[in-house]
Image (cartoon, rainbow, N blue to C red):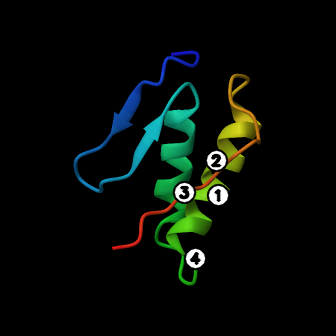
Amino acid sequence: SRGLGDVYKRQDDGIIGIGSGGNYAMAAAKALYDIPGLSLEEVAQKAMQIAGDIDVYTNHNVILESIKK
C-alpha cells in the first residue's frame, strides 16, 4: 500500500494494522499478544519496531496514543 493508510483487521481477535507495514505489525502483535506481563502498549511498541525492521516504507518514528476507558 506504500503509505496509503490501508487498514488490515482480522475479525477474530480485534488486532489491526495500518499502512504499508500494517501486515508485519499485525503479525508481530499477534505473536506478542499472549506473552504474560506485556501490556497492550508494549505489544504495540514492539510490533511497530518489528514492522520498521522489515518494511522499507515503515520507519521507527512512532507516537503511541492510547485511549483510556
Of the residues under marks 4 and 1, which one precedes in the sequence? Answer: 4
Q: Which residue is disc 2 drawn over?
A: 48
Residue 1 percent coordinates (x, y):
51, 16
Q: Which residue is disc 3 drawn over?
A: 65
Q: Residues within 10 Å of mark 3 (few under 14, many from 20)?
A: few
On residue 38, the disc is 4
In this rendering, the answer to whether 67 lies above or below 63 is below
Rounded to the nearest angstrom, the CA distance separating label 2 from label 1 is 5 Å
What is the three-letter code of the residue carrying label 3?
A: Glu
Quadrant containing the C terminus in the rendered view: bottom left
Residue at 58 percent across and 15 percent down: it is 2
C-beta proximity under 8 Å, tags 2 and 1: yes
What is the three-letter code of the residue carrying label 4?
A: Leu
Rounded to the nearest angstrom, the CA distance separating label 2 from label 3 is 13 Å
Rounded to the nearest angstrom, the CA distance separating label 3 from label 4 is 17 Å
Which is more foreground, mark 2 or mark 3?
A: 3
Q: Which residue is disc 1 drawn over?
A: 45
Rounded to the nearest angstrom, the CA distance separating label 3 from label 1 is 11 Å
